Image (cartoon, grey):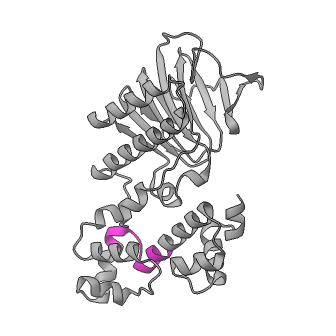
Amino acid sequence: MDALSGLLDGPRARGAFLLRSVLDPPWGMRIQDESPLSVITMARGDAWIMRAGEAGSRIGPGDVAVVSGSSPYELGDQPGRKPQVVIHPGQRCEAADGTELRMTGQGVRTWGARPDGATVMVSGTYQMHSEVSRRLLDALPSVLVRPVEPSDRALIDLLVREMDSTEPAQELVLDRLLDLVLVSVLRSWLATPSPGRPGWHQAQADPVVGPALRHVHGDPAYGWTVSALASTAGVSRASFARRFGELVGEPPMAYLSGWRLTLAADLLRQGDATLEAVARQVGYGSAFSLSNAFKRRYGVSPQDYRRR
């Protein structure tokens, strides 16, 4: 599996929370539901996403925003709008004064005071970290806003239409549509030169670094060295290391270690393999060596990571 396939193979929604919000200015909400990933698009009107320490991002009609990481953020009709609603884990909703609110309103998966509000926002939220791979969260910026491609528009329209349905297995259909929307947006982002794209994506097409990346991603458990990777491109060790650092943004062995640990994180979440088996699968000689490296990178032991 190459790096791009590994990234886009990640999202697997299970009972994702999907909601159409119909709003009238002034409006503001604080999202602190601790979800790992959310997808937001505007069917009508626009909105601003604000996160502490970051510049606000505007979402206009025809834009899709991907919000990653579990830290809180705010949505409003303009920057700095004071939140009137707070969304907690489990989609529990409160007014700013702490009064419990119920997400009821205009029918199936729709919330709002009236059907013809000035702003219509559609959001889909991945509920659990096990639904999103660590490698995807590591690659994404905190807030990614993209204009909708024509092909994406049809997919989003289908998602919105399906939200009104109450057919059997509807939750499963919506989960897969949300995954497709996310993958389509990410593929468009990666294909367009823009700030914030991961360095390895550009490097995949490089005649020196590209073959090494494919080897690392195809067989991460192999005992790769800088010399062995340099030989795959037929260049010297020094030339390869320099070129790799320039394009990817980190040394070859640091990248290899990071890739192995992201794979380990995914395996720990998605299965019940022993730590020893995970270590062998991703290229560590023992559970002990994997545990030490894992704790240095993520701040918790593999066992604690799996429990969380």
The residue depicted at 59 percent of the width and 40 percent of the height is: 15
Q: Is residue 186 visible?
A: yes
The residue depicted at 48 percent of the width and 30 percent of the height is: 48
218 sits left or right of 121 in the view: left
252 sits left or right of 209 in the view: right
**Residue 21 position in % (x across, y down):** 54, 22
267 sits left or right of 33 in the view: left
**Is 71 above or below relative to 63?**
below
Residue situated in front as seen by the camera: 89 or 25: 89
Residue situated in front as seen by the camera: 253 or 277: 277
1 sits left or right of 71 in the view: left
Quadrant, the C terminus? bottom right
- Magenta region: which residues? 246-257
**Is 300 above or below relative to 129?**
below
The residue depicted at 72 percent of the width and 61 percent of the height is: 307
| Main secondary-structure element of the magenta-colored stretch | helix
**Residue 165 position in % (x across, y down):** 50, 24
Residue 102 is covered by the magenta coloring: no
Quadrant, the N terminus? bottom left
**Residue 275 position in % (x across, y down):** 65, 75
